[in-house]
Image (cartoon, rainbow, N blue to C red):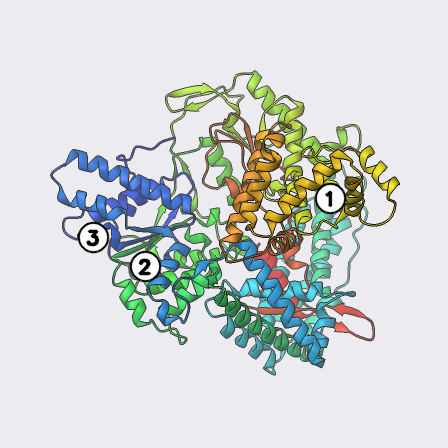
Amino acid sequence: MKMSEKAWTIDQSKAIEARGGSLLISAAAGSGKTAVLVERILQRITDVEDPCDIDSLLVVTFTNAAAAEMRARLGKRIQELFEQKPEDTNLRRQQILLQHAHISTIHAFCIELIRAHFEKLNIPPDFRIAEEQETESLFEETLNELLEEENATQSDEFYELSRTLGAGRDDFRLVDTIRRLFDFLQSLPNPDEWLDEQNAKFSANLSVTETVWGEEALSYIAETLRGIVDSLQSGLDAMMGCEPLEKAYAPAFLKLKTQVESALGILKGNDWDELCEAVQHIENARLGSARKLEDTFLRERLKAIKKAAQTQLNVLAEGLLNGRNADFQQDMNKLRPIVRILSQLVKKLRNRFFKAKIDKGMLDFGDLEHLALQLLKEPDGNITETAKLVSSQFCEVLVDEYQDVNPLQDALFTAVSRDGANLCMVGDVKQSIYRFRRATPELFLKKKETSSPYDGRHFPARIILGKNFRSRAGIVDAVNFAFGQLMSYPFGGIDYKKEDYMTAAASYFEKPVENADFEMTLLETDGYPGNEDNAVLEARYIAQTIRKMMEMGQMVQGEDGPRPLRYRDICILLRSANRLSQTFLDALKQEGLPGFAEVTGGYLSSYEVEVILSLIRLLDNPLQDIPLLSVMLSPIFGFSPDDIAALRLAYPKGNLYLAILEEGKKGNERFHKFLEQIGELRQLASVLPSDRLILRVYEQTGALSIFSAMPNGEMRRSNLRLLLDYARNFESTGYHTLSDFIRYINQIAQNGDLQRASSVTEEADTVRIMSIHKAKGLEFPVCILAGCGRRFNRADIQPGMLFHPKFGFGGYIRDPSLCCHFNTLPREVVRIETEHDA
């Protein structure tokens, strides 16, 4: 629903008019955040008492699309005001200045800052932003060179690192660990300083309870033990008055509760070894028999409480409390050299990789943030003269989606806003979904907790925008209920308090009671015949549900009132669209429904792209049978399998291309024409860059027309045009040969894929299938959240070496005599914290 831009709520008015210091605006979904920000900026630039030009505001958004929308909205509103007051010269001035206003993503701001002060960074002034595939290729090359050098030194420490982190005959896990640590450091303000701090933790000769891992472990153990005591007590209270249960279950509950309370008493004394002994020797008291009890639900509930308590105790005994203090010291002695050599390796890698990029005159997005911070902050943390100069240019710094910033970005915003004095942060921790990109919502939470409700006098201050002008009341209530049950400080780092609850404020037409705003469906897959995958059954059910909704003529809210539901109004949301999108597309197709999924990957394996790339490989080296077969059997040249079989029977040995040459010499017209065309293209390949060569291939073979005539022709044509764009981007990085382009494509294929072309416009009437991340910021009248029964992805806690901003390195140790790995306290703490954060 569109909210009137003039009918502001009390909290919205505060967010628009607040001045005087650091401000945090916690804006729930659908709260009119963008409209509020636009109005706040308008009031800043039209304020008679304290005027502020629009180019003296720094407005940072999360995406380029959001920045473009913000600029467009501001332009429209300024034009509306100017039409009302054509004599206002200030509005005319702001219209002109809007073209140069600092409304952009953080990376665009960093580029502008670095280009203005490049001489202080010892980098070329004409640097360019590298393509992702280009940096990936260069990173892999730099890392391989570094590892080869380290292997050549035959260092005992490097050998132990390889044995501990590696497995089998290759160094895949070692490379993966180095790569993950490198990526992890990119989000930190001072990576080298962080590495030094973590090494110092392993060098300190401290007992378990004196370390950061021991302190956190004790806190977690205390919380777990108290939870067990509370759950056992709730079980005792539940069975009170039921004599059969008290007789059968109470003794076991009381015995276990007494032992846990004893362990809690030991924990207060900080005696680690005694605590380990106590928890590891807690007896598993057996429950008595209560089979004749009529209240089976209560009986099963009590069994579950007892089982959960015992499971938690076993996890503690086998995890955090698996070793005594002496064991911890031995683990530290083994981890210390591993952490040191790993840190040294990554420091070398960072320096070499940066130099390699500078030598090519390019930077990546991580470089932009680090170089910008280098301009704004001294190594000791003090603000630089450049920061003072830059921050003096802005009367206010407004940052959207602040819940998704990382520590490095937070340091940047603080430095450029006079240490946060004129910083306006807008976000919503409930919408933080980018932790996999190193987003740190705890930063937003901490700022929110340390601020006071806005009163115009005390800063930093916070304003809560809790009214939802987008969703129906049933959806808002469902979200509040779910978050109220799940979001607590121990579980999610935030207590979902009353001030965080959303309030439904949208106006909708009344609909039949049986059409619920929010519906949860539990599919009992056991009732379905066959052995079909659960995802297939779920996709089929959803497709059938959509078909029924369309057949019933379900109504949705339009701009002018109720209107019939359209396919484009429906979105199926998945945690990962890449994996399951085809399953849902197939289900929609079976029901005769249109569907579209924009997924990453699969581009290089699409048939039309494979054929053209095979042809390019053939032009580089014709003595490759597989690319040659792919090209000959394609619709471009139209040879049949029988043609190839006959050729191979005639020439059973040697390369296929040599056999074709022989047939061409004998007067075989088809093979002669094929060789003639390949020969012409090979001559062009020796002088043309890859993008122009691909264009000539399209022109001389008619590839675009041929593949356009096939099923999904529009998509195939778009993919081929996109290949031309990728080649142009590659050639723009400097002079390259055709072999370089082929090597570039091969490296992409090994490490990932390229984005497919999209052949569906926003106006197309089709059901959308997309990931939750892709859907952020979009609106659909009907949203279907699928795949809720799938397990959470725990890949982040599987590797042998884990990393955490506060607790540093957490790794396994290797026992050479047993040829196996063992867990350590640092790794268990980092694992728990990583799982908790996720």
Q: Is residue 541 above or below residue 29?
A: above
Residue furthest to the top? 552
Label 3 with label 2: CB-CB less than 8 Å: no
Dot 2 falls on a residue whose secondary structure is loop
Between discs 3 and 2, the one toward the N terminus: 3
Q: Is residue 334 visible?
A: no
Between discs 1 and 2, the one toward the N terminus: 2
Amino acid at pointer 3: Cys
Which is in the foreground here, disc 3 or disc 2?
Answer: 3
Check the picture and name the quadrant holding the N terminus. top left
Which is in the foreground here, disc 1 or disc 2?
Answer: 1
Examine the image and state in which quarter residue 529 appears: top right
Amino acid at pointer 1: Leu
Residue 652 percent across, percent down from the top left: 88, 45
Residue situated in front as seen by the camera: 405 or 264: 405
Dot 1 falls on a residue whose secondary structure is helix
Mark 3 to mark 2 CA distance (whole Å):
21 Å
Q: How many marks?
A: 3
Mark 1 to mark 2 CA distance (whole Å):
68 Å
Which is in the foreground here, disc 3 or disc 1?
Answer: 1
Residue 566 percent across, percent down from the top left: 50, 22
Residue 460 numbered tag: 2
Residue 809 percent across, percent down from the top left: 61, 69
Q: Which residue in the structure is indicated by mark 3?
A: 52
Q: Is residue 304 above or below residue 209?
A: above
Q: Which residue in the structure is indicated by mark 1?
A: 628
Label 1 with label 2: CB-CB less than 8 Å: no
119 on left or right of 665: left
